Image: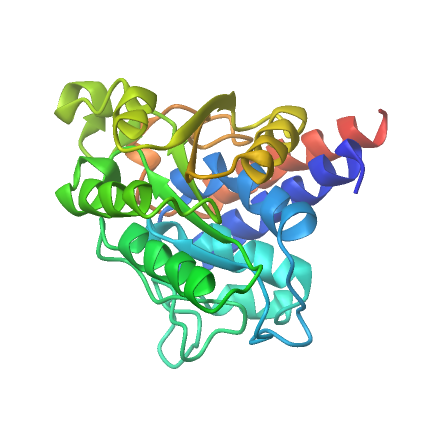
Amino acid sequence: MTNLELKKTANEVRKSIVTAVHSAKAGHPGGSLSAADIFTYLYFEEMNIDPKNPKMADRDRFVLSKGHTAPGLYSVLAERGFFPKEDLVTLRHTGSYLQGHPDMKHIPGVDMSSGSLGQGLSVAAGMAAAGKFDKKDYRVYALCGDGEIQEGQIWEAAMWAGFRKLDNLVVIVDNNNLQIDGTVDEVCSPYPIDKKFEAFNFHTITINGNDFDELWAAFQEARETKGKPTAIIAKTLKGKGVSFMENAVEWHGKAPNDEQYEIAMADLEKVGEALCQE
């Protein structure tokens, strides 16, 4: 896809995020919106996947370690054709397969159930190691939150992945600098994130995670890196695309009311109209 097509797709993903969370009257819009460009790049450009065959043996794997941003993952899966977009409004509803956190048993395209923070990278490292043991070419991607990497298990997994030289593993840290209690540097600073991953034998790349040119360059560099896993520290804007949610910690985990929903969708419509003029 062209950059413009990716931007337009990401904007549609953002509309779906806001719509799903509004319908659920609960959920996590801020981190879903900050990572929307990352989700879009992975599922429309980077990963070898097939919506018609979600369990394809040689597919690339994705683990949403920060599982609370499931609205972002569901929205891109629906946009990519894994299930109907109309189902997004059932998010968190009783009986819906779209639960508050990803469920690999019931949602097409979800490779790992997640939600308990800190655990996803361990699973992704195991998947990458299995690929190496089986001499398979698939790659494994894990998206972690910058607040999530305060969890010790993340660094146990990083130590092991670096030691095992898992160059088929890419960790993306959604570095929007906000977590549920405030800014990450005030709650429990993980900085410098790149130096910490480097200490565990990772190749590190720091980018603007809301810029598709930089995303393209980073994932290309990761593919060319041999003998060690890659960590992409993606600096993003929490709540990106919705005026009153941008860089606002209170939108980490709450749903817009009807009036706020209308404002949010109008914001995203304006973005879409501007993209059509490019």
Quadrant where the image shows the N terminus: top right
From this view, report whether residue 116 is shown above or below residue 183: below
Q: In this view, does 147 lie to the left or right of 206?
A: left
Q: In which quarter of the image is residue 184?
A: top left
Give the color scheme: rainbow, by chain, secondary structure or one colour. Answer: rainbow
> Residue 143 or 5: which is nearer the viewer?
143
From this view, report whether residue 207 is shown above or below residue 140: above
Q: In this view, does 184 lie to the left or right of 76?
A: left
Residue 256 appears in the picture as rendered: no
Give coordinates of residue 68: x percent, y percent: 33, 52
Q: In this view, does 270 lie to the left or right of 38?
A: right
Q: Is residue 248 left or right of residue 22?
A: left
Quadrant where the image shows the C terminus: top right
Residue 157 appears in the picture as rendered: yes
From this view, report whether residue 107 is shown above or below residue 12: below
Residue at 80% in and 36% down: 2
Q: Quadrant of residue 156?
A: top left
From this view, report whether residue 173 is shown above or below residue 108: above
Give coordinates of residue 266: x percent, y percent: 63, 36
Residue at 37% in and 47% down: 255
Residue at 34% in and 67% down: 113
Residue at 24% in and 37% down: 149
- Total marks shown come to 0
Give coordinates of residue 131: x percent, y percent: 46, 63
Give coordinates of residue 136: x percent, y percent: 54, 64
> Residue 196 or 201: which is nearer the viewer?
201
